[in-house]
Image (tube, rainbow, N blue to C red):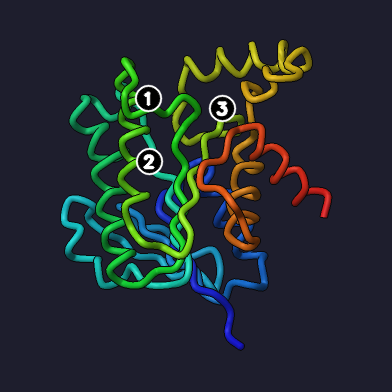
């Protein structure tokens, strides 16, 4: 029997980069399709790179086919340059991907949002994250998984000063975060990626996964 086909959107980011590396090593997957706005060399014979224009989604809709779609796209208002550009990356693109994937009979749709996502939040960032969570759940996928990590640890291509300060504070206070406070511990991008793959490959009775749950799922994969 042939292996699975997975698609990764956000493969050049922190979580997406780890997803790509993990899935390359995973024998359950035969082909990996990654979608990028800039050219990049394929890191493996099982990886197919598609250079696409995200502002012209109809041009690559026919390529959104396979067993699983992993979406780890995300930016900040500062990096995007405006609220409108932030919405495009964090809401409009994932919304289109969910619609196209559903139409093309993709089985599973997994997306990374953020802790605090709430469509009714006073905070713009959290509100947008909550809105995309609600949007992707409208489609009749075999499985929808929403991952809400806390502050992410790992090396990014771009520097985020606020995150760097937060990581320093988290390294100091994480050992003190026990009980209900555990959910606020920083989490490694690699751990989130491992948890994402574990969720896609084992029966789950839930849609939304907290950061603490991602810690457990990812750490179990490390121990396996």
Q: Earlier in the sequence, mark 1 or mark 2?
A: 1
Left or right of residue 84: residue 181: right
Q: Position of residue 82 (x, y in %)?
A: 21, 25
Would residue 131 be found to the left or right of residue 7 on screen?
Answer: left
Q: Residue at x 65, y 50 (%)?
A: 194
User: Is 146 above or below relative to 200?
Assistant: above
Q: Are marks 1 and 3 in contact (CB under 8 Å)?
A: no
Q: Of marks 3 and 2, which one's residue comes earlier in the chain?
A: 2
Alpha-carbon distance for marks 1 and 3? 12 Å
Q: Is 187 on the left-hand or right-hand side of 117?
A: right
**Along the line of sight, the residue nearer the viewer: 78 or 65:** 65
Residue 9 visible in the shown view? yes
Direction from residue 192 to residue 124 in the image, left or right: left
Q: Residues within 10 Å of mark 3 (few under 14, many from 20)?
A: many
Taking the view exactly as shown, the residue that stands out farthest to the bottom is 1
Q: How far apart in space, not on screen, are marks 1 and 2 (Cα)? A: 11 Å
Q: How many marks?
A: 3
Where in the figure is residue 210, as x and y percent of width and height? 58, 34
| SS label for mark 2 | helix
Taking the view exactly as shown, the residue that stands out farthest to the right is: 223
Residue 7 is situated, as x and y percent measured from the top left of the image, at: 44, 63
| Residue ID for mark 1 | 126
Label 3, label 2: how many angstroms apart (C-alpha)?
16 Å
| Pointer 3 residue | 150
Image height of 171 relative to 73, above or below: above
Secondary structure category for the residue under label 1: helix
Mark with earlier residue (1, 3)? 1
Q: Residue at x 33, y 67 (%)?
A: 64
Is the residue 216 above or below the residue 43 in the image? Answer: above
Label of residue 133 in the image:
2
Q: Residues within 10 Å of mark 2 (few under 14, many from 20)?
A: many
Q: Looking at this view, is 19 or 183 the one in front? A: 183
């Amino acid at each position: 029997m042939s292996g699975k086909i997975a698609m990764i959107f956000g493969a050049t980011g922190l979580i997406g980069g780890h997803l790509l590396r993990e899935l390359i090593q995973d024998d359950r997957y035969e082909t990996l399709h990654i979608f990028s706005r800039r050219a990049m060399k394929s890191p493996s014979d099982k990886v197919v790179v598609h250079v696409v224009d995200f502002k012209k989604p109809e041009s690559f809709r026919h390529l959104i086919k396979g067993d699983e779609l992993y979406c780890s796209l995300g930016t900040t208002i500062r990096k995007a340059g405006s609220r409108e550009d932030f919405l495009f990356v964090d809401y409009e693109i994932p919304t289109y991907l969910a619609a196209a994937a559903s139409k093309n009979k993709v089985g599973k749709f997994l997306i990374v949002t953020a802790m605090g996502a709430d469509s009714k939040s006073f905070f713009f960032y959290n509100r947008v994250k909550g809105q995309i969570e609600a949007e992707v759940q409208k489609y009749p996928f075999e499985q929808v998984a929403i991952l809400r990590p806390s502050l992410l640890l790992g090396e990014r291509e771009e520097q985020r000063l606020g995150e760097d300060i937060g990581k320093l504070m988290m390294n100091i206070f994480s050992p003190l975060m026990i009980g209900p406070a555990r959910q606020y511990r920083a989490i490694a991008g690699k751990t989130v990626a491992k948890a994402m793959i574990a969720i896609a490959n084992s029966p789950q009775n839930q849609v939304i996964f907290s950061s603490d749950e991602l810690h457990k799922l990812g750490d179990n994969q490390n121990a396996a």
